[in-house]
Image (spheres, helix red, strand yellow):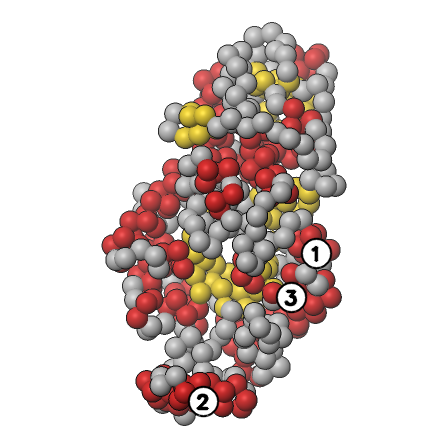
Amino acid sequence: MLLVYTHKITPRLNYIFKHICKRILDVPVSFTTTVEEFIAHDSLKMSYSRQVLGNEFHVKSHDILFDQGLSDVDILVQDWGHTKCFFHNGEKSAIPFDIFAASFYLLSRYEEYLPHVKDEYGRFTPNDSLAFKHDFLHQPVVDIWAQKFKAALQQQFPDFKFNTRIYNVKPVIDVPTAYYFKQKGLMRTIGGTLSDIFRFKIKQLYQRYLVLLRFKRDPYDTFKWLTNMQKHTKSKFTIFFLIGDFTTYDKNINVNKKKFVSLIKSVADYCRVGLKASYFALEDFSILKEEKINMEGIINTSLEASRNSFSKLNLPNMYRNLIELEIKEDYTMGYINAIGFRAGTCTPFLFYDIDYEIQTPLLINTFHVMDFVLLKQKSLLDKKETLLKIIKEVKQVKGTFTPVFHNYTFSDEKRWKGFKELFTLILDSTNED
């Protein structure tokens, strides 16, 4: 156990030390404000305060972990070996930066509470992030800092044995619409047919009726392939179905259709099923609650995971709604148009509510790449190289890699050519040394 001496034990301090020490390094941690107790401890220990006590392992603290609410924080990002860091703390500290304060800043998404310009869907953009501006978005810096902290501790306490964690993958499959042609109802089918005719999409019109007459599989119906992949891999897929009402933003199948319900049930036999919250559920608690109840009725168990439509995340309200509905995990945190680590980490972490200054039970699983970003790469080789680079970053800290693909990504559409191979590459990455 690591004993930390500090002049004041705060919720922020407790939160971030437990994340770095327990979740990343697998070392139990406790705190004391009593010097005598600290001196008597004969194992792993350190002080975290403004002043050093003697010749102990000491990290000079930044004020942010002892503050409440938001304040103007001066941030100077500097090089630290092959990575970056901020909150430099001088020569008397065992490590040159207060990694605990810096990690709290990133994990709490402190910068997303500050004034910023949102995109057309009301999302925080990567260009506004500290990580993008200072070129460390591509690195899981919180995990890298934790490893540097571990190395410094090992040097001071060579007899202490640290556990080693294992790299793993958490694939996410997003299903905004389960079928392209099937199960759309009479009016939507007629509307689609007329649209094909007026826009001279004869090939699509032909394909539409081949599917409707059951001569051909629906292009978005890739669920048999996905469940077969699940049977042959140890990485558990989480598949998020949109079951909200038809709106301008959300255009999935009606949840009252038996074949759609049957599809979700059959997928749930092999994969983990989550709720893709509809666009209007993000602002309306009653809609979100209804969607949760409907999904639980389909899968016949408690809903554990959710993900937001359009990857829109309005902090902290959406997370508070999930907590109130006792949903345990969220998979929305990430960027749809950039590859990297939005919260600076590849380790799932608990949401910290800055307004209430409490650690919540909601586990945040950040995603690190979305299929649409890979579409920007010209060739399949470029896509592979991009994927391998981000996987390498996660592997180096033995973290959790979370990619987001869609059900239609695995269709035979020309633009998605090679994406089955990319998905397989990700799954196979757990088998390599």
Mark 1 is surrounded, within 10 Å at the Cα level, by few (under 14), some (14 to 19) or many (20 or more) other residues, namely some
Residue matched to label 3: 280
Marks 1 and 2 sit apart, C-alpha to C-alpha, by 41 Å
State the mark number for residue 194.
2
Amino acid beneath label 1:
Asn
Residue shown at 53%/11% (left/top)?
92
Q: Which of 206 and 14 is in front in this view?
A: 206
Using residue 309 as the reference point, say whether residue 369 is left or right of it: left
Q: Nearer the viewer, residue 202 or 276?
A: 202
Amino acid beneath label 2:
Leu
Residue shown at 32%/67% (left/top)?
415
Mark 2 is surrounded, within 10 Å at the Cα level, by few (under 14), some (14 to 19) or many (20 or more) other residues, namely some
Mark 3 is surrounded, within 10 Å at the Cα level, by few (under 14), some (14 to 19) or many (20 or more) other residues, namely some
Residue shown at 55%/58% (left/top)?
120
Residue matched to label 1: 321
Residue 260's spot in the image, x, y percent? 54, 79
Q: Quick check: can you spot residue 346?
A: no
Amino acid beneath label 3:
Phe
- Name the quadrant containing residue 227: bottom left
Foreground disc of the pair 3, 2: 2
> Which of marks 1 and 3 precedes in the sequence?
3
Residue 252's spot in the image, x, y percent? 54, 75
- Contact check, label 1 and label 2, Cβ < 8 Å: no
- Contact check, label 3 and label 1, Cβ < 8 Å: no
